[in-house]
Image (tube, rainbow, N blue to C red):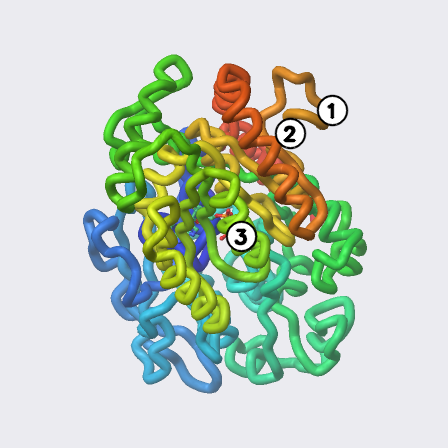
Amino acid sequence: MYIVQIASECAPVIKAGGLGDVVYGLSRELEIRGNSVEIILPKYDCMRYDHIWGWHDAYVDLLVPWYGGTVHCSVYCGWVHGRLCFFIEPHSQDNFFNRGVYYGCSDDNMRFAFFSKAALEFLQKSNKRPDVIHCHDWQTGLIPVMLFENYKYDMGLQRVCYTIHNFKHQGIGGVETLWATGLNRPEYFFTPDRLQDDFNPFVLNFMKGGIVYSNFVTTVSPNHAWEARHTEIGYGLGHTLHMHQDKFRGVLNGIDYDIWNPEVDRYLPAPYSPSTIEEKTQSKKALRERLLLQDNDKPIICFIGRLDEQKGVHLVHHAIYYVLEQGAQFVLLGSATEAGINTHFQHEKQVLNDNPDVHLELGFNEELSHLIYAGADMIIVPSNYEPCGLTQMIGLKYGTVPIVRGVGGLVNTVFDRDYDETHLPEQRNGYVFYQTDHQAIEFAIDRALGLYFNAPDEFRQLVLQGMSYDYSWNYPGKEYLEIYELIRHKAV
Ligand code: ADP
């Protein structure tokens, strides 16, 4: 099958979070299974060019219709660790992708509406006719809309699978989006069964468009698919999902075990596996040396992730102090996009600066994240909501016991050692708490530390049980191929 992924990220060349990992990892798995995969991305000024090989022109003068005129674009091409990627660069005064950031501009909706239009124009003009176009998140929500409304007669029969990684960010536009992209006809699109937002009738909702117009819609875990339909976590799209329930499903993300695997990880001082688990202490030692933490026999608890409301920052903050009180060490690696949260953690970093048992690393650091996953004994994921969550799955692979809040994909991947009733004791792999108050996370941390200090053999057994889980792309890759086959052969 010929599959084209269109997204705003692909790790490691463009990565702000899990989306990038998923686009890369899924593409790789699909290729291993004998399919041909290409990835279309924006060409950002700030992406990691050092991860691209064989950079060359793919399409020199791509003229993309935009408002009444056209925008001249260049399309480049190169391999990102074996994946064939196309990068679209518009030459216009808007400088859409030369902003030094991937997201967070006031015209993000127009930046990605343009990218969506340009990606389709590129497919059409370069005679690429994939069997399936797989789009991701709000940034590409307009692709199935434009494909169906404006391109289908030129393009032929392309099927679209649309994956929602985060319902909170839906992409909102006004009538200008319609004029710019050539969709036009406001009276047609501003209707409840098309793109009109369910809360604000004066705006268009890109993600809603993606749901309505795609042949299949997925989100990134079965539990989150349920939450999105039935709770406020759908951020207002529950009704639309309900209307399209027959083509909606949760498919658990995988992680790429070529990248996230302590047996082959080049960022670790020594490889380890379940049979050589004692070698993990070398990573712990290296982590302490690198972050200037005291070398003692305390366990290390870590947090890795974006510092924002979604990730439960108030519980992260509380956990730092609680863990220190309980005689353990804490390492945090996180970046905040919100100024208030950033200032807060900068302040905490100063306050804790002289404490030899804690390190707060504020910023994005892929290399360091590998050493933390390996060097820590436990990882906390206290999210308010978590569509899938990759950090707990990576933690499991590295023998780092997850302590998570029971929401979203965390429920599908972490099974409480003491209380899970659906898994046998030998299948349990971490600790789960449910409430958002301090006591809930404290109790879970107490249980984890209690086992670590008082029953080291049992803690080791829990580590090994976690490492034995297979959260690779093997199963999800198969499931996505089934979905692609389904929509290819379904008359919609
Ligand atoms: P989300 O997509 O909501 O950000 P996920 O858990 O799905 O969260 O994916 C997070 C990914 O981003 C993981 O690969 C994690 O290691 C990585 N990550 C998050 N924050 C950082 C950071 N500050 N430095 C390095 N990697 C990070």
N-terminal of the two: label 3 or label 2? 3
Q: Verify CB contact (< 8 Å) between mark 3 and mark 2.
A: no
**Mark 2 Cα-neighbour bin, 10 Å: few <14, some 14–19, many ≥20:** many
Residue found at x 42% / y 29%: 398
Can you tell which mark lies on residue 415?
2
On screen, residue 86 above or below 26? below
Residue 308 at x, y = what percent? 53, 61
On screen, residue 411 above or below 234? above
Residue beneath disc 1: 422
**Mark 3 Cα-neighbour bin, 10 Å: few <14, some 14–19, many ≥20:** many
In the displayed structure, does residue 231 sit left or right of residue 33?
Answer: right
N-terminal of the two: label 3 or label 1? 3
Q: Residue furthest top?
A: 275
What type is the residue that disc 3 sits on? Val
Distance from disc 1 to disc 2, alpha carbons, whole Å, reads 8 Å
Secondary structure under badge 2?
A: loop
